[in-house]
Image: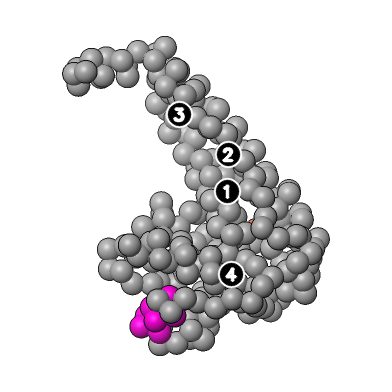
Amino acid sequence: MSAKIVQNMLKSAPFSRLYMSQIRSKATLPCLKFEYKDLEPIISRDIMEIHHQKHHNTYVVNYNNTLDKLQTAVAKDDTAAIISLSPALKFNGGGHINHSIFWDTLTPHSTKPSDDLNKALIQNFGSCDEFKKQLATASIAVQGSGWGWLGFNPQTKKLAVISCANQDPLFPTTGLIPLFGIDVWEHAYYLQYKNVRADYVNAIFEVVDWDAVSKRFSEASI
Ligand SMILES: [Fe+2]
C-alpha cells in the first residue's frame, strides 16, 4: 500500500473513528498483589483501601472519560478540543501510571536490591542509605502534592532522584524511567501520619519491594 493511499485513509473521518475504536482500550484499576492490611503498621488498611479503590480509581475513570472526549474530538478534526484535553490527560493518565507503579513496588515481605541495582545505587549515590536519604529529602520537600522518584536516565545510564508536582508522570515529563516513587499527596498518609510527612516517607522504605524495583531497573538498563 502506497504512502499516499495510507494518508488518504487517515484523513477520512470514518476511518479515523474506526481506527480510534480499534486501538482504544479502557484503562482498568490494577489488582494489588497483597491485601490492604498487609502493609500495616507502615501503611494502614484504611489508607490502602481508600487510596486504591477511591483515589486511584478516580484517576482511571477520569482518564477513560478524557480518552472518550479525545476520540470524539479526533473524529471531528477539532484541533482546539484535542489540545484542550492535554492537561486532563496528563493529570489523570499520570495518576493512573504513578499509582500503578506505586502498588507494584510495595510489599509486606522482606526484600533487598539485586546485586546490579545495589552496585548502581552505590555508584550513583555512595551507598544505599545515602540514596534513601536523598529520596526522602526530595520527597519531603515537595511543595503541596506530588511524588519523589528514583529514575533511570536511558541516555547517561545513571540513576537520579527527582521530584514531580501533582501527578506529572516521570518519563513523559523528564525522560527518566521510573523505578520507584513515593506518593506524597496527603491522601497517601494523612489518616495515619497526620501532617508529619517525614515520618511516612522514612517509614515507607520498610515496605519497598526491591525485587520489583530491581526488575524495573534491569528492564530499563538493557
Ligand atoms: Fe495517591
The residue lying at 58 percent from left, 53 percent from top is 100
| Residue 136 in picture, x, y percent from top left | 56, 77
- Residue 96's tag is 1
In-image side of 152 versus 211 (left or right)? left
10 Å neighbourhood of mark 3: few (<14), some, or many (≥20)? few
Q: Name the residue under label 3.
A: 23
Q: Mark 2 points at which residue?
A: 27
10 Å neighbourhood of mark 2: few (<14), some, or many (≥20)? some
In-image side of 74 versus 142 (left or right)? left
Check if mark 3's residue and mark 2's residue have beta carbons within 8 Å.
Answer: no
Check if mark 2's residue and mark 1's residue have beta carbons within 8 Å.
Answer: yes
Cα separation, mark 4 vs mark 2, equals: 24 Å
Q: Name the residue under label 4.
A: 209
Please state which amino acid type lies under the numbered disc 3.
Answer: Ile
Please state which amino acid type lies under the numbered disc 1.
Answer: His
Q: In this view, does 56 lie above or below 135?
A: above
**Magenta span covers which residues?**
117-124
Q: Residue 119 magenta-drawn?
A: yes
Check if mark 4's residue and mark 1's residue have beta carbons within 8 Å.
Answer: no
Q: In this view, does 22 lie above or below 28?
A: above
